[in-house]
Amino acid sequence: MYKINANICDELNETTYYTKLENGLSVYICKKPGFKKKIGMFGTKYGSVINDFVDIKTGKRIKVPDGIAHFLEHKLFEKEGANALDLFSKIGVSSNAYTTFDHTVYYFETSEKFEESISLLVKLIKEPYFTDENVAKEQGIIGQEIMMGEDDPEYRVYFNAIKAMYQKNNVRIDIAGTIDSIAKINKELLYTCYNTFYNLNNMFFVIIGDVDVEDTIKLIEKNVNSYDNLKVDKEVEIFFDDEPKEINTKEIKEEMDIFMPQIYIGYKLDVLKNEEIIKNAIVADIVSQMYFSKITGFFNDEYNKGVLIEAPALVYEGSNSFSYILIAAQTLKLEEYKKDIFDYIERIKKEEINEELFNTIKNKKIGSLVIEDDNLNNCYRRVIDSILTQTDIYADVKILNNLKVEDIKSFLDSMTNDNRIVSIINNKK
């Protein structure tokens, strides 16, 4: 019999319940009293960077083509003669799926058909059906998706930035793969990946909404157990190439038919673990507001000179295999902007941190946590982040409360000339 654990967050006046079913599936329920909408998510800790692993059935190490995690997502949500989106729409429920670098999720949002939605979601994920014909059809569909990405300047400048930073890590590969890599995918490989990563011990079910916790857990267990679910007690064994500390190349520049050139400044960081990943994302948001938002002198100077129209956006992205900072901007004066931002970053690294501004933004962010918690999407992101980083669900609240100016200083110091890259998509002359 499973035990239900309650994780209470007094600051948010919220409780998230967790249990691990006997079949190995982890279930999280974030109770939201008074909310009519409910979100259900069935996910796996399997994303695009994972292509080298031990086949759970044969026990042998195997390497599969890039893009297969995303391909698998498409095939599970595209049933023979029916599309999952259409099946959910027929019962008045919205649904979708997505694949990232490190996980894949299938979800629904509903106000009325909660039990039916859980049943349908489990059915779609637990009934894989791959044939030579439907694999070939999907190769054409995803091939078009890949080509659309290649024609998207924002997508190109982003992945070029990652390619500039990383030499071997699969984060440098488009999540959808390449035309060549998806051509190597077949039904046998799909079943191998499915059996390995869609085993219940590697999966999670997340519910956000005003639901009865015990009844919902029983409902999920009943639906999942209606399928032949062989429990797998061991963790999936995954391998990553050793990534050099050094960046791949200083700059990648391309030209496209665009009006406004795009530029990303990137900083390749040491890989972080657990709470450090969440902490760096929080610090990045505060640094972005303190030094790159519209309230800053830097933006006002650049705006007055006609270099920038919108403020740059600084973000941190990290997992257990990669870690980097990106600063995105658009400008017609690329060289002037590059010089200005490089000089500015070096200057702020030497200056004293404005402690009053730091505390103002920190306190505002603490207040925003409560307000934003009314958005159910923020709730599920918190839960999934905790699953992937193996941290407490409310680690972000604790980290934010304990943040100090020294953390801002440390973050700024990690942005060095040695680990810096530039990615540019310029307009064709």
Image (cartoon, rainbow, N blue to C red):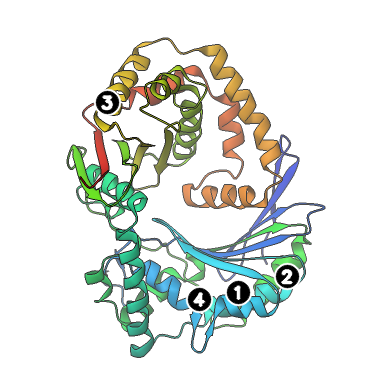
Between marks 1 and 4, how big is the CA–CA gap?
9 Å
Q: How far apart are marks 3 and 2 (CA)?
A: 55 Å
Q: In this rendering, which labeled residue sits more in front, label 4 or label 3?
A: 3
307 displayed left or right of 163:
right
**Image location of residue 408, percent across then percent down:** 45, 22
Dividing the picture into quadrants, the one containing residue 60 is bottom left
Residue 145, visible in the rendered structure: yes
Where disc 1 sits, the SS reads helix
In three-dimensional space, the C-alpha distance between marks 2 and 1, rounded to whole angstroms, equals 11 Å
**Residue type at numbered disc 4:** Phe
Residue type for callout 3: Glu
Q: Residue 265 carries which label?
A: none
Tell me the residue that label 1 is attached to.
Answer: 121
Residue 57 can be seen in this image: no
Q: Which residue is drawn at 58% across and 18% down?
A: 359
Residue under pointer 2: 114
Q: What residue type is labelled 1?
A: Leu
Q: Name the residue under label 3.
A: 336
Q: How crowded is mark 2: few (under 14 residues within 10 Å), some or many (20 or more)?
A: some
Q: Which of marks 3 and 1 is nearer the N terminus?
A: 1
As helix, strand or loop, the secondary structure at mark 3 comes to helix
How far apart in space, not on screen, are marks 3 and 1 (Cα)?
52 Å
Residue 224 is drawn in which quadrant? bottom right
Q: Residue 77 carries which label?
A: 4
The residue positioned farthest toward the top in the image shown: 352
Q: Which of marks 1 and 4 is nearer the N terminus?
A: 4
What percent of the width, then of the height, locates residue 243? 22, 46
How many angstroms separate mark 4 from mark 3 (CA)? Answer: 47 Å
**Mark 2 vs mark 4, CA separation in Å:** 19 Å
